[in-house]
Image (cartoon, rainbow, N blue to C red):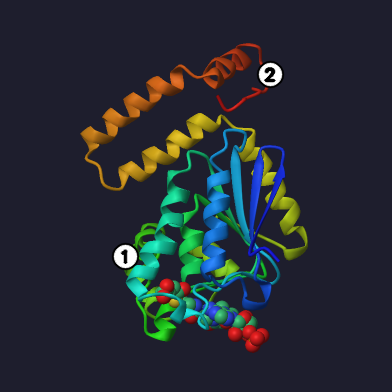
Amino acid sequence: MAEVELSRQGAVLTITLNRPDKLNAFNRALHKGLAGALKEARDAEVRAVVITGAGRGFCAGQDLTEFNEMPDVGTGLRETYHPNILAIRALEKPVLAAVNGVCAGAGLSLAVACDIRIASDAASFVPGFVGIGLVPDSGGTYFVHRLLGASRAFEWMSSNRKLTAVEAHAWGLCSEVVGADAFLARVAEYAAQLAAGPTKAIGMTKRLFDHADHATLEEQLELEAQLQAVAGRSEDFAEGVAAFGEKRPPQFNGR
Ligand code: T3D
């Protein structure tokens, strides 16, 4: 059984974490499989990526029965979690976390590192780390405080309170909650819509928002100008303007 399964539907690559008996908790093999999948996601033919979990979990974070696989916790994080989190941010295309079930610890960090989260109403969100005496890692502090604000982020991450999908939505942690029966269809629809977009412009929008987190206004204006010059030379921009003039929907090709 592969710890990570890949499937393609047109320009959508779906990455399924596949250790359902352990709620898809991370071990070395899962990290390796995810790293390979994120490499495949760089293929220009892939224009949207979905990350989800097999069975009733999204991901329960570090496999607590396999801690001792790691030389030490810090080294383990640097060797395994960090490259995958950075690879998600480096992908110049949208990455959708389809949170099908419980999402805890570094599984939560993985979800919040993605660009968009939609949740099944069967999903829940659990800080996890504090429950076993650890600090949030794998980007959990970086992304959660941006999504929730420092005060709520600290209160939540230091409480280990389990949030339902509906609560997570109310907090802005996910953008949509879908009934479990309709979840797969909605994920497919959303991903296909993302994949049909002007991928280059969407990818550069992602880069701009990441840059805005640490840039001055002057630096941000400059990067916007540079990337707009690139977007302005794209086939999708030509198509977008032509379609507007011809009063028809654009057919973007991602180039
Ligand atoms: O060294 C380093 O790299 C440090 C990195 C740390 C990163 C981290 O992620 S630290 C945080 C680790 N994660 C957790 O602490 C979460 C532990 N799990 C839970 O708190 C609960 O399982 C959940 C809240 C996620 C779900 O609860 P529930 O009641 O829905 O399910 P359950 O019955 O607890 O779990 C179902 C099975 O999955 C169960 O196995 P069993 O009894 O049926 O054979 C359980 O042991 C297993 N499972 C759940 N989480 C993990 C796990 N097995 C290994 N590792 C897990 N993290």
Crowd tier of the residue under label 2, counting other residues whose Cα lies within 10 Å: few below 14, some 14–19, many 20 or above: few
Q: Quadrant of the C terminus?
A: top right
Quadrant of image for the N terminus:
bottom right
> Which residue is drawn at the image coordinates 70% and 44% (left, top)?
8
Seen in the picture, residue 195 relative to 168 is either above or below; the reply is: above
Q: Which mark is residue 248?
A: 2
Q: Where does residue 224 sit, x and y in percent of width and height?
A: 34, 29
Residue type at mark 1: give it: Ala
For marks 2 and 1 on the same chain, the one whose residue lies earlier in the sequence: 1
Q: Nearer the viewer, residue 161 or 101?
A: 101
Density class for disc 1 (Cα within 10 Å; few <14, some 14-19, many ≥20) is some
Does residue 161 appear in the picture of this structure?
no
Residue 97 in view (yes/no): yes
Vertical placement of residue 91 versus 63, above or below? above
- Please state the horizontal and vertical placement of residue 19, each as a whole percent of the image: 65, 71
The amino acid on which the numbered mark 2 sits, given as a three-letter code, is Arg
Residue at 55 percent of width and 74 percent of height: 60
Q: Is residue 88 left or right of residue 96?
A: left
Residue occupied by mark 1: 150
Is residue 81 shown left or right of residue 243?
left
Question: Element under label 1?
Answer: helix
Is the shortest distance between ligand 1 and the CB of mark 2 under 8 Å? no
In the image, 89 versus 206, the foreground residue is 89
Are dots 2 and 1 in contact, CB under 8 Å?
Answer: no
Residue 34 at x, y percent in the picture: 55, 57
Of the pair 121 and 213, the residue shown nearer to us: 213
- State which image quarter holds ligand 1: bottom right
Q: Is mark 1 within 8 Å of ligand 1?
A: no
The location of residue 131, given as percent across then percent down, is 43, 84
Identify the residue at horizontal 23%, vertical 37% (top origin).
217
Residue most extreme to the right: 181
